[in-house]
Image (tube, grey):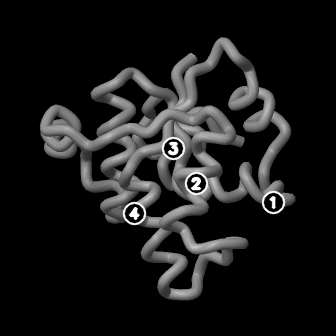
């Protein structure tokens, strides 16, 4: 299964946050599952870090790419095909970062690894607790 990490899941995973579930860890660490991190998530992490809402052990400009590579998570850019999928998503969730992640899942046949129960409204192929 191809996995896309939700923005909150990636920092939980790399710092060993207690909110990170064992089912997430098992799926992410299974070598049969390619794992991706959207550039939208990196962007959101940088914003949250700058606002003081995301504590990280180092500045995100170096820390996030280094940890992504260390954990063998592939970057996922945003392309035109993904943005077009936004028009197909109902307005159930107003967070633009979450909406772009959902669109990337549709575009690239990915399962979003998330603990965000609001995203379940979309009835997409999510991987969550």
Q: Is mark 3 on a helix, strand or loop?
A: helix
Q: In this view, does 99 lie above or below 44?
A: above
Q: Of circles 4 and 1, which is in front?
A: 4
Q: Where residue 106 sits in the image (x, y, percent)?
A: 32, 29
Q: Residue placed at 45% from the left, 58% from the top?
A: 42
Query: In the current view of this chain or complex, which residue is farthest to the top?
Result: 32
Q: Distance between the residues labelled 4 and 1?
A: 20 Å
Q: How far apart are marks 4 and 3 (CA)?
A: 23 Å
Which residue is at the front of the view, 52 or 128?
A: 52
Q: Which residue bears the numbered disc 1? A: 17
Q: Of circles 1 and 2, which is in front?
A: 1
Q: Is mark 4 on a helix, strand or loop?
A: helix
Local crowd size for mark 3, using a 10 Å CA cut-off: few (<14), some (14–19), many (≥20)? some
- Position of 35 compared to 24: left or right? left
Q: Which residue bears the numbered disc 2? A: 116
Q: Which residue bears the numbered disc 4? A: 43
């Amino acid at each position: 299964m191809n996995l896309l990490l939700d923005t909150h899941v990636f920092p939980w995973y790399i710092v060993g946050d207690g909110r990170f579930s064992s089912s997430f860890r098992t799926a992410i660490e299974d070598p049969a599952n390619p794992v991706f991190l959207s550039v939208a998530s990196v962007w959101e992490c940088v914003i949250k870090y700058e606002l003081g809402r995301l504590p990280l052990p180092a500045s995100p400009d170096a820390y996030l790419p280094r940890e992504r590579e260390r954990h063998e998570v592939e970057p996922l850019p945003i392309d035109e095909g993904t943005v077009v999928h936004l028009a197909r998503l109902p307005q159930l969730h107003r967070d633009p970062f979450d909406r772009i992640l959902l669109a990337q899942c549709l575009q690239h046949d990915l399962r979003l690894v998330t603990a965000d129960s609001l995203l379940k409204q979309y009835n997409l192929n999510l991987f969550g607790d």
